[in-house]
Image (cartoon, rainbow, N blue to C red):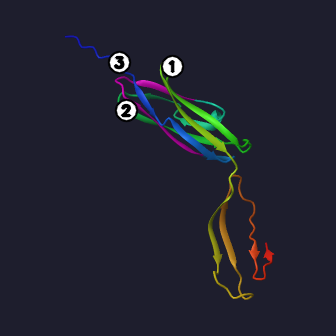
Amino acid sequence: MNLTIPQDSNWTRSPSTFGTIVAAPNSTGAVGNITVNNTGNVRVSLQYLRSGAGATMVSVVPAAVDLEKQTVTQAQVTYAIGASTPPGLYNVTITTRNVDGSRENYTYLTLNVTDTPPQFTALNITPSELELFLENVSISANLTDNFGVSAAWANITLPNGTNNT
């Protein structure tokens, strides 16, 4: 008896899109993972290719993989935006394909490069109640920005309505 098992090199990829990621100039971050499932009965060799206006801002690690039959792997997608990158929308297509080019799937994302405001955390004002003209007030906060914070000012409104900086 001869038994022939046909070769099956099918695989699936997800997600098909990461949507839009807001990214500030001079920043880095994680986009997500591309998951590939080898549903076939042979090993497949795959590679990840980037294209589009934002391709140079996106990395996929690993860039290629040999995936054994009936196994799953993930590739990590990250971004790095340069300090001088102009604001705008940058489309990226990540192509997952067999190294022989016989099959490919696409994952899409858009980088929305826009300058973001500084982040204020751990704001603390002490004391919370005081005797007018008899006590000092301390104000502290942690401030972060994609280009670094060099200084911060507090505008204080006095009971008579005047402002001090």
Secondary structure mainly formed by the magenta segment: strand
Residue at the image position 59 percent from the left and 44 percent from the top:
21
Q: Is residue 40 magenta?
A: yes
- Secondary element under disc 2, as helix, strand or loop, is loop
Identify residue for label 1.
Answer: 101
**Given the image, on which type of amino acid does mark 1 rest?**
Gly
Q: Which image quarter is the C terminus in?
A: bottom right
Secondary structure category for the residue under label 3: loop
Rounded to the nearest whole Å, what is the CA distance between mark 2 and mark 1?
21 Å
Q: For residue 125, what is the image quadrant?
A: bottom right
Numbered badge on residue 71: 2
Count of picture labels: 3
Question: Tag 1 or tag 2, which sits nearer the N-term?
Answer: 2
Label 3 Cα crowd, 10 Å radius (few <14 / some 14-19 / many 20+): few
Indicate whether 102 appears above or below 93: above
Per the model, the C-alpha gap separating discs 3 and 2 is 16 Å
Write the residue at 68% across / 58% down: 118
Answer with mark 3 or mark 2, whichever residue precedes in sequence.
Answer: 3
Q: Position of residue 10 (x, y in %)?
A: 40, 24
Q: Residue furthest front?
A: 161
Q: Name the secondary structure under disc 1.
A: loop
Identity of the amino acid at label 3? Gln
| Highlighted range, magenta | 29-49
Residue 146 placement (x, y as % from top left)? 68, 52
Which dot, 2 or 1, sits closer to the camera? 1
Badge 1: residue crowd in 10 Å (few <14, some 14–19, many ≥20): few
> Quick check: 9 above or below 157?
above
Q: Which residue is mark 3?
A: 7
